[in-house]
Image (cartoon, grey):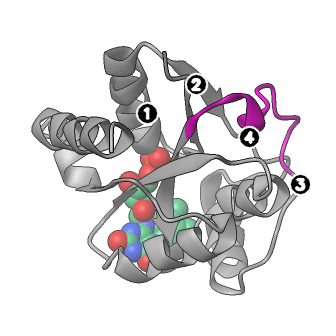
Amino acid sequence: MMEILVAFYSRSGKTKKVAEAISDILKCDKEEIFDTKNRKEIPGFLSAGTDANLRRLTAIKEIKNNPSLYDLVIIGIPIWSSNISTPIRTYLSLCKEEFKKVAFFCTRLGSDSKKVFADMKNLSQKIPLALLELTSREVARDQYMQKVKEFIKNLKEETVK
Ligand SMILES: Cc1cc2nc3c(=O)[nH]c(=O)nc-3n(C[C@H](O)[C@H](O)[C@H](O)COP(=O)(O)O)c2cc1C
């Protein structure tokens, strides 16, 4: 059986909701990434935007699950300033040697995810098996399960190839 991990960061719960839906369907492990830098309220929001825009790294809290023990790591982000959110940029930089296979998903207000997914591919040094993009609105309105199911179907088709 394939060992799968869903690794994600979520500042305000949207990406977490999708991560939980995916891990519930796949009955797999989850790794929530936490930033040691405060990202709450206005100063946190501003630092998040600046750090993502400048492609800075941060210090994340200790990772519990070693990605190298999984056949597939599904990585989820909120988009910040048209970029990978800083905690996941850090996770990808730290763990890039550890991934076997990857897939990506994101939540965002409306930005184009292509460039962000391409950046995640470069950082992880892996071609993703499948991609999923959702708007915060779809998540807030619980209109995301169809796309989540399609993503999982695509993943399953790719993993048997
Ligand atoms: C600092 C910051 C910058 C953001 N920049 C963008 C952006 O450039 N484009 C976009 O579509 N959404 C942007 N968003 C919106 C988030 O991507 C969106 O609300 C996301 O669903 C939040 O996920 P979360 O609840 O898991 O943190 C930004 C949010 C934050 C906090």
Rendered view: 7 above or below 42: above
Disc on the earlier residue, 2 or 1 = 1
Q: Residues within 10 Å of mark 2 (few under 14, many from 20)?
A: many
Q: Check disc 2 and report its element: helix, strand or loop.
A: strand
Left-right relation of 103 to 57: left
What amino acid is at disc 2? Lys
Q: Which residues are magenta?
A: 60-72
Amino acid type, residue under disc 3 in the picture = Ala
User: What residue does disc 4 label?
Assistant: 34
Identified at 25% across, 44% down, the residue is 151
**Residue on which the image places disc 3:** 59
Quadrant of residue 9 within the rendered picture: top right
Say which quarter of the image contains residue 122.
bottom right
Check disc 1 and give the amino acid type. Ala
Please say if 129 is above or below 63. below
**Mark whose residue sits in front, 4 or 1:** 1
**Distance (Cα) linking label 2 and label 1:** 8 Å
Tell which circle, 4 or 3, labels the residue nearer the N-terminal end. Answer: 4
Q: Are marks 2 and 1 in contact (CB under 8 Å)?
A: yes
Residue plotted at (77% across, 60% down): 90
* Residue wearing tag 2: 30
Distance CA(mark 3)–CA(mark 2): 20 Å
